[in-house]
Image (tube, rainbow, N blue to C red):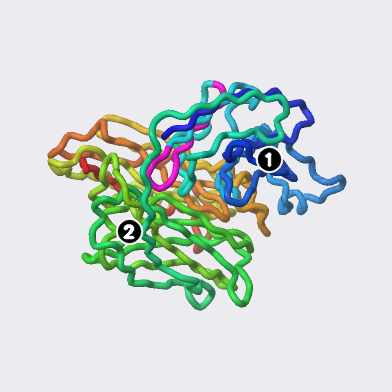
């Protein structure tokens, strides 16, 4: 089933915003303290934020940098956030004013829904997956938008759903100054035939001694029966804050079967966190089956050093394709780390473009996250709101995914090269030179 809605709102300049919620027909409309923050128990909603509160009169620079107000770089105030069951899940800056026509499509898929929201002709969210959201028996309802007209319709039959099988990997594992690495032997399903999606839930909680005050690099690794090690997930911990995330890891399906060794790795020297990680396996049809994960460039690469050029790390790769291969995708998790005295405050606070070359095709991306201030995990007790090289404190690192299916010739091979924008670091920090930390793979698909 697909639910479609269109509307347009000319909000007055003093409007703080409004919400769109999925509610039963004839339901009593909920009251919201802030219509742009529709955190309603048991409800899926979108928030449309049009108001950027100014800093308090006489606020110090420290209050501005560390306080709860996020948009200190004066981006346009036209944010659209996603909320489910009382929590904000995502928040993005719209490409154009929210007074333009808006169109929403919610489509049932295995494990939840895919959301597409367009503002005028531009997509803000495109097939954005949200787990465990239902649309049957609910209708889109505007809240805090007087005299607005919304038109909606349903297309198709409801999708038949089955409950997921949950596999617990870590349950309140202590990750603190004395426990930088925690291992667990996990019994995944022996067969993943008939599985349409895998969703990982990550929860960080307070320890008995408190919670860590710093943003730390944290990773989840899987070591298979042959001894190969794969990074499944990377997150940067929040400044003194507990949080939780749900992440689609279906591309790693071929690794998530049978008995496997998982390792939680995060180097901290303070109170740390209690970490819980679960995997939900949702039965259902899958459009294309990921059947092989091929490692490409993995590890920590120094950048900008004349005597240790990154090209030594980024050696081009040739990957043979099986005759059953019908699709491929480049899947990479890269984050920049290091600050002053590294030149240009790299690699944490300096943007660099990167290019993926594949058999005559070139794909370009900028390793820079400008919407850090929109992170749902806010506010935090640190510099949580400043743009960074591919990451935000208190967030799971989003992969750069490039669909390479058009280059696939079954039984042949793919030639891959990764190029980084030239950068010179004549003043590397001793012991911590600017670096990019890589996890990258080629995911191969076949017909189910």
> In whole angstroms, how far apart are the C-alphas of marks 1 and 2?
47 Å
Name above or below for residue 192 compared with residue 226. Answer: above
Which range of residues does the magenta coloring cover? 108-120
Residue 117 location in percent, x, y? 52, 31
Name which quarter of the figure residue 55 lies in.
Answer: top right
Q: Tell me, yes or no, if residue 84 can be seen here.
A: yes
Q: Which mark is residue 93?
A: none
Q: Which residue is tagged 1? A: 29
Task: Answer whether labels 1 and 2 touch (C-beta < 8 Å).
Answer: no
Residue at the spot 58% in from the left edge and 73% down from the top edge: 207
Residue at the spot 15% in from the left edge and 42% down from the top edge: 324
Residue 142 location in percent, x, y? 64, 33
Residue at the spot 58% in from the left edge and 40% down from the top edge: 24
- Please identify the quadrant where the C terminus is shown: top left
> Seen in the image, is 347 located left or right of residue 327?
right
> Seen in the image, is 373 located left or right of residue 401?
right
Q: Tell me, yes or no, if residue 312 can be seen here.
A: no
Q: Is residue 113 magenta?
A: yes
Q: Is residue 80 magenta?
A: no
Q: Which residue is tagged 2? A: 230
| Element type at mark 1 | loop
Residue 339 location in percent, x, y? 57, 54
Q: Earlier in the sequence, mark 1 or mark 2?
A: 1
């Amino acid at each position: 089933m697909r639910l479609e809605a269109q509307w347009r709102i000319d909000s007055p300049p003093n409007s703080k915003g409004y919400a769109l919620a999925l509610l039963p027909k004839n339901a009593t409309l909920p009251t919201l303290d802030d219509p742009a923050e529709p955190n309603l128990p048991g409800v899926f909603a979108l928030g449309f934020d049009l108001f950027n509160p100014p800093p308090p009169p006489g606020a110090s620079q420290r209050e501005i940098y560390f306080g709860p107000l996020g948009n200190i770089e004066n981006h346009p105030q036209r944010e659209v956030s996603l909320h489910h069951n009382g929590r904000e899940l995502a928040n993005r800056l719209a490409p154009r004013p929210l007074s333009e026509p808006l169109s929403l499509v919610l489509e049932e898929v295995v494990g939840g829904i895919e959301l597409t929201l367009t503002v005028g002709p531009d997509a803000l969210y495109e097939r954005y997956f949200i787990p465990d959201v239902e649309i049957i028996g609910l209708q889109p309802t505007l809240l805090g938008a007087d005299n607005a007209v919304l038109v909606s319709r349903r297309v198709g039959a409801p999708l038949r759903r089955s409950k997921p099988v949950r596999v617990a990997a870590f349950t309140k594992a202590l990750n603190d100054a004395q426990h930088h690495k925690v291992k667990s032997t996990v019994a995944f399903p022996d067969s993943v035939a008939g599985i349409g999606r895998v969703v990982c839930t990550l929860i960080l909680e307070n320890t008995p001694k408190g919670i860590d005050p710093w943003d730390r690099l944290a990773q989840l690794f899987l070591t298979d029966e042959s001894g190969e090690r794969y990074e499944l997930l990377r997150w940067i911990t929040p400044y003194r804050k507990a949080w939780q995330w749900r992440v689609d890891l279906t591309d790693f399906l071929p690794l998530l079967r049978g008995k496997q060794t998982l390792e939680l790795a995060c180097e901290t020297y303070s109170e740390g966190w209690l970490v819980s990680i679960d995997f939900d396996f949702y039965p259902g049809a899958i459009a294309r089956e990921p059947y092989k994960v091929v490692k490409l460039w993995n590890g920590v690469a120094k950048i900008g050093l004349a005597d240790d050029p990154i090209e030594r790390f980024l050696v081009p790769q040739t990957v043979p394709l099986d005759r059953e291969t019908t699709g491929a995708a480049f899947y990479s998790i890269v984050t920049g780390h290091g600050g002053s005295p590294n030149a240009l405050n790299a690699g944490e606070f300096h943007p660099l473009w990167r290019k993926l070359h594949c058999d005559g095709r070139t794909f370009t991306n900028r390793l820079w996250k400008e919407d850090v201030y929109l992170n749902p995990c806010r506010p935090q007790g640190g510099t949580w709101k400043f743009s960074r090289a591919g990451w935000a404190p208190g967030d799971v690192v989003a992969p750069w995914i490039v669909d390479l299916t058009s280059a696939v010739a079954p039984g042949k091979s793919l030639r891959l090269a990764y190029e980084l924008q030239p950068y010179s670091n004549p003043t590397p920090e001793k012991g911590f030179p600017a670096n990019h930390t890589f996890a990258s793979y080629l995911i191969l698909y076949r017909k189910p």
